[in-house]
Image (cartoon, grey):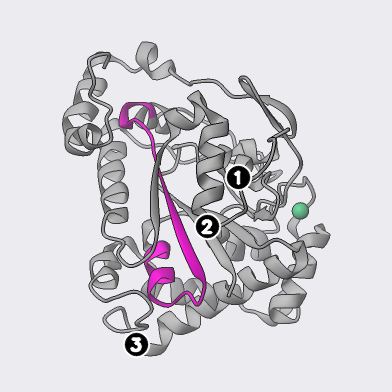
């Protein structure tokens, strides 16, 4: 059974950086946001993290062949239809209501969840085989997919719940960010502060409903402050042998090899030496009104995660 580290949390919480760092561990293979592979990779042929188009990437061609006999053998429309039936955040309470590994019930016709999960199980196994890794890292982030995998993933699932200060997250969702994933003019989605706050509450709360699978909660700010300690914690949580010296990490920097991450934040394309430093722009640039609004709307979990200390 393949071990999958699923990185969950609301977008703009630093999941791409955490995935890239963890993907440097010996025995790990980080593949980006698999939930988007079917549409953005298979159908739209967006760029892989290695810089080539999905259809030109030899890693993904090999993985598709191993998993399905080739990408032509699957219908991405079928995966999308199944996703609409079982993998929605509004189904999380029903998915969470039954023990792990109990299979379908309550989220549509019995076969839908099993069929939907079979695409993921086969792909994870193929990634492990093609890469030779013992750990596959999927940074899909969505809580509903974590709940589907918990119920019927057929994998040894470990969930890394990544959290970040809601004010920083709301600030990031308000900015216009170009997507380098395609040649078309394309920008990442933007949210108003109130919508970002609601999303932050809902998505994070959904990870507290995961039962029966290992869940590790990690603050992005702690990763940035002490990357090596965070990466060692992730390795131990994922069942990887304790790594020796982490030559790819230094004080305030990491050295990243190109990867085959299929979708995610633009930093998935970054290679070589990158800086790791706190991103505190929101403290100066998020206006007082939205800042108060986001703080008030998210205060219960913000306090629970330790973000309402004296400095803040
Ligand atoms: Zn690639």
Quarter holding the N terminus is bottom right
The disc placed on residue 109 is: 3
Per the model, the C-alpha gap separating discs 3 and 2 is: 28 Å
Which residue does the image show at 47% across and 65% down from the upper left? Answer: 157
Residue 272's x, y, as percent?
Answer: 76, 31
Could you say which disc has been placed on residue 22 in the image? 1
Q: Give the x, y percent position of residue 256.
A: 72, 36
Q: Could you give the CA–CA distance between mark 3 and mark 1, rounded to whole angstroms?
A: 37 Å
Choose the circle earlier in sequence order: 3 or 1. 1
Q: Is mark 3 on a helix, strand or loop?
A: loop
Tag 2 and tag 1, C-beta contact below 8 Å: yes
Q: Which mark is residue 59?
A: none
Q: Can residue 49 be seen in this view?
A: yes
Q: Mark 2 points at which residue?
A: 5
- Pointers 3 and 2 in contact (CB under 8 A)? no
Q: Is residue 75 covered in magenta?
A: no
Q: Nearer the viewer, residue 223 or 247?
A: 247
* Magenta residue span: 145-168
Q: Is residue 230 above or below residue 280?
A: below
């Amino acid at each position: 059974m393949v071990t999958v580290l699923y990185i969950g949390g609301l977008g703009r919480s630093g999941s791409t950086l955490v995935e890239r760092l963890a993907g440097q561990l010996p025995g790990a293979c980080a593949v980006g946001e698999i939930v988007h592979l079917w549409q953005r990779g298979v159908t739209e042929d967006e760029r892989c993290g290695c810089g080539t188009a999905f259809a030109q990437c030899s890693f993904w061609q090999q993985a598709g062949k191993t998993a399905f006999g080739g990408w032509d053998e699957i219908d991405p429309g079928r995966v999308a239809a199944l996703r609409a039936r079982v993998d929605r955040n509004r189904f999380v309470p029903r998915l969470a209501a039954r023990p792990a590994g109990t299979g379908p019930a309550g989220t549509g016709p019995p076969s839908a969840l099993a069929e939907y999960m079979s695409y993921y199980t086969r792909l994870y196994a193929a990634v492990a085989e093609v890469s030779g890794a013992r750990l596959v890292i999927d940074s899909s982030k969505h809580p509903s997919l974590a709940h589907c995998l918990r119920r019927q993933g057929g994998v040894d699932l470990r969930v890394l719940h990544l959290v970040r200060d809601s004010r920083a997250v709301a600030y990031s969702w308000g900015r216009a960010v170009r997507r380098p994933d395609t040649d078309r003019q394309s920008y990442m989605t933007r949210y108003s502060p109130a919508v970002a706050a609601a999303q932050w509450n809902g998505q994070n709360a959904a990870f507290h409903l995961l039962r029966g699978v290992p869940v590790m909660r990690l603050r992005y700010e702690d990763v940035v402050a002490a990357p090596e300690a965070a990466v060692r914690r992730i390795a131990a949580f994922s069942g990887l042998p304790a790594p020796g010296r982490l030559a790819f990490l230094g004080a305030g920097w990491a050295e990243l090899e190109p990867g085959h991450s299929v979708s995610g934040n633009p930093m998935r394309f970054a290679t070589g030496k990158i800086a790791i430093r706190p991103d505190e722009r929101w403290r100066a640039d998020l206006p007082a009104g939205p800042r108060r609004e986001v703080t008030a709307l998210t205060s219960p979990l913000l306090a629970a995660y330790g973000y309402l200390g004296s400095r803040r």
